[in-house]
Image (cartoon, rainbow, N blue to C red):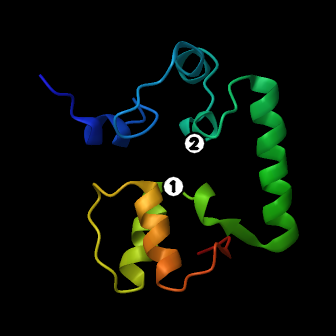
Amino acid sequence: MTLDWISLLKKDRCKAFGVPWNDEERSALYELKIPAEYVRRGFVTVAEYEKEKSKDEAKVKETGKVPLSSLRKEKLLALVHGRGLTATDEATKDVLIALLVQDGCPKSVPAEA
């Protein structure tokens, strides 16, 4: 039996396609309630998460831009489609970001984008 990694990834029930959460990451997600996007970036304690979240918010406030890597997958997919590119909701965030950058999109976009 094979796992449906795409469904698991969409529901934040795995770290990446073919990569399950380890025990520390699972604890960060389900016990500490740290968002999956931060756990995927390696922040598994509340202190680490809060510090990084503050940095992210300060950077957005200072520049008015958000790095593509910080956007939710749904927003990335909308940007891809908005540029006339083709991708399905099964594409991973990394693939969507690569498509955007390849098409000349800057690595940071306006916060309202």
User: How far, Cα to Cα, is label 2 from label 1?
Assistant: 8 Å
Q: Nearer the viewer, residue 99 or 81?
A: 99
Q: Nearer the viewer, residue 4 or 31?
A: 4
Residue plotted at (58% across, 75% down): 113
Please tell me whether residue 92 is drawn above or below residue 15 in the rendered image. below
Tag 2 and tag 1, C-beta contact below 8 Å? yes
Please tell me whether residue 91 is drawn above or below residue 79 in the rendered image. above
Q: Secondary structure at mark 1?
A: loop
Q: Quadrant of the N terminus?
A: top left
Q: Secondary structure at mark 2?
A: helix
- Residue tagged 2: 37
The x, y position of residue 43, in whole percent, is 70, 32
Is residue 8 found left or right of 65 in the rendered image? Answer: left
The x, y position of residue 13, in whole percent, is 39, 29
The x, y position of residue 68, in whole percent, is 59, 65
Q: For the image shown, how many numbered marks are present on the structure? A: 2
Is residue 94 found left or right of 109 in the rendered image? Answer: left
Label 2 neighbour load within 10 Å: few <14, some 14-19, many 20+: some
Amino acid beneath label 2 = Glu
Residue plotted at (79% across, 35% down): 50
Query: Which quadrant of the figure has residue 47?
Result: top right
Of the numbered discs 2 and 1, the one sitting upstream in the chain is 2
Please tell me whether residue 94 is drawn above or below residue 99 in the rendered image. above
- Residue tagged 1: 72
Query: Which quadrant of the figure has residue 14?
Result: top left
Is residue 111 found left or right of 61 in the rendered image? Answer: left
Residue plotted at (68% across, 70% down): 111
Amino acid beneath label 1 = Arg
